[in-house]
Image (cartoon, grey):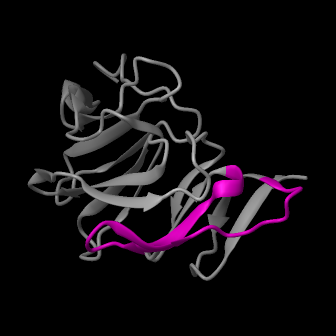
Amino acid sequence: MQNGDGLLGKAYYQTCIAFRKPDSYRYYYIFTVGNYSFPPNDGIRYSIVDMEANGGEGAVVSKNLYLTGGNDAMDVITATLHKNNRDVCVITRKQQADQYIYASYLVSPTGIAQPVYTINRKFTPGMMFTIGGIKISPNGKKFIDFQNADDVLGDFDNAAGIITKVCNPILTASFTEIGGEFSNDSRYFYYCGAT
């Protein structure tokens, strides 16, 4: 795509996510995230694609724009529909030694709002190392972050963009998960990994 080279983002698991701008058939957003382990960390950035540019072939018209509060975003990014079924919540993880911090950005027809933060104490202190990414259930109500033995499971409020009721699901000590997925009805979560 024209001007599509040079997008930032160099994470292991979920480097980018793209979707149509709410209430627009012409513009798309591409969100990218860097890797905290490999400075300089690019943090969370976004680019805008105009699908009518370049004779209808599309073009990146704004590239690698910085998002407020996202300088230490790392490794993973996901998105889900807002409760109003129009807007989108974009969620990323921020790197901290003693807390889980997640930033949620509301994307609406008017643009991208300032982030809302969810902050919780870590189950095990120390820097986080990405094992398999973050997921939101299809109904937009559950959240999981794969952190090997320190997974974070919680309720996601897709109206406010916050994570509540955080817990650490206990898995068999000999099992190392590397990812997973929610069931279509959001009732179950399936881990994949190795023993």
152 falls in the magenta region: yes
Residue depicted at x 55% and y 39%: 127
- Can residue 179 be seen? no
Give how far across and how far down residue 51 sits, in percent.
Answer: 24, 38
Q: Nearer the viewer, residue 170 or 77?
A: 170
- Left or right side of 163 for 185: right
Q: Based on the displayed image, in which of its 4 quarters is residue 26 positioned?
A: top left
> Which span is picked out in magenta?
148-176
The N terminus sits in image quarter: top left
- Left or right side of 70 for 92: right
Q: Nearer the viewer, residue 58 or 90?
A: 90
Residue depicted at x 30% and y 66%: 161
Residue depicted at x 40% and y 48%: 92
Give how far across and how far down residue 137 sits, in percent.
Answer: 51, 70
Q: Based on the displayed image, in which of its 4 quarters is residue 186 positioned?
A: bottom right
179 falls in the magenta region: no
